[in-house]
């Protein structure tokens, strides 16, 4: 499996980079930190970690990876974004800071910090049929929700109240929660399948 998978990257500007590298490595992937356009050139897929999307946005401009990432996404590179990473993949965001940009890709609107200060963080079990019968233990940390999806976006998971927390659109995968901190590797495996399919 791993031998057929080209190298993949984790965007390493800010956020829980190590956890994603560990999850991908545990699956046998050649996973590398991506901090520069040259690093990006060497990978066939990218994970955008959780963290703070406004900081990832600013650093991506400072480190000159913003434009190359946007171009690769437009060209069909598989990308998996968790939490802040999902925000970075949305074509449209709500409650961003002034001037906040995303890389885009998902025909979706994502609201930052959707659970307010009362419920900053929580954990729950989510039924996600696309990943098999075992529920996903989902850790939400100042998490976003997906408020609108276009016709080409598949909804993978919702909370009990119906709010959308995991989506997929072709080579793109996004979760409002953090599988990488819960020992949940099925999303990373799904991302690696997309990388193999694209290469
Ligand atoms: N609230 C953060 C943001 O707006 C996301 C939090 C997270 O990634 N855990 O980017």
Image: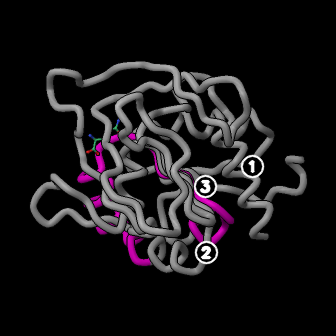
Furthest-front residue in this view: 161
Circle number at residue 38:
none
Say which quarter of the image contains residue 25. top right
Lower sequence index among marks 1 and 3? 3
Question: Is residue 69 depicted above or below 155 in this figure?
Answer: below
Q: How many marks?
A: 3
Is the shortest distance between ligand 1 and the CB of mark 3 under 8 Å? Answer: no
Question: Is residue 169 depicted above or below 165 in this figure?
Answer: below
Mark 2 secondary-structure assignment: loop
- Regarding ligand 1, which quadrant of the image does it lie in? top left
Find disc 2 in the rendering and name its residue. Answer: 76
Lower sequence index among marks 2 and 1? 1
Going 55% across and 57% down the picture, which residue do you hit?
Answer: 154
Mark 3 secondary-structure assignment: strand
Label 1: how many Cα within 10 Å (few below 14, some 14–19, many 20+): some
Q: Please provide percent x and percent y for residue 191.
A: 67, 51
Q: Are marks 2 and 3 in contact (CB under 8 Å)?
A: no
Furthest-left residue in this view: 98
Q: Please provide percent x and percent y for residue 82.
A: 46, 44
Q: Are marks 1 and 3 in contact (CB under 8 Å)?
A: no
Who is closer to the viewer here, 158 or 53? 158
Circle number at residue 9:
3
Residue range (magenta): 39-67
Say which quarter of the image contains residue 142. top left
Going 90% across and 51% down the picture, which residue do you hit?
Answer: 3
Quarter the C terminus occupies: bottom right
Going 56% across and 63% down the picture, which residue do you hit?
Answer: 169
Find disc 1 in the rendering and name its residue. Answer: 30
Who is closer to the viewer here, 169 or 48? 169
Q: Nearer the viewer, mark 2 or mark 1?
A: 2
Inter-mark Cα distance, 1 to 3: 8 Å
């Amino acid at each position: 499996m791993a031998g057929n998978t080209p190298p993949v990257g984790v965007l390493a500007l800010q956020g829980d980079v190590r956890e994603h590298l560990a999850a991908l490595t545990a699956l046998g992937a050649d996973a590398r930190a991506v901090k520069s356009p040259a690093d990006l050139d060497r990978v066939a897929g990218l994970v955008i970690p959780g963290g703070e999307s406004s900081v990832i946005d600013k650093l991506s401009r400072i480190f000159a990876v913003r434009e190359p990432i946007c171009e690769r996404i437009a060209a069909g590179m598989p990308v998996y974004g968790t939490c802040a990473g999902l925000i970075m993949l949305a074509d449209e965001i709500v409650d961003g800071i002034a001037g906040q940009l995303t890389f885009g890709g998902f025909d979706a609107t994502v609201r930052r910090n959707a659970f307010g200060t009362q419920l900053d963080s929580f954990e729950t079990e989510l039924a996600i049929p696309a990943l098999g019968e075992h529920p996903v233990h989902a850790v939400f940390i100042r998490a976003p929700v997906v408020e609108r999806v276009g016709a080409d976006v598949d909804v993978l998971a919702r909370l009990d109240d119906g709010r959308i927390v995991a989506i997929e659109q072709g080579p793109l995968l996004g979760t409002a929660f953090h599988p990488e901190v819960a020992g949940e590797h099925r999303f990373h495996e799904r991302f690696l399948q997309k990388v193999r399919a694209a290469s």
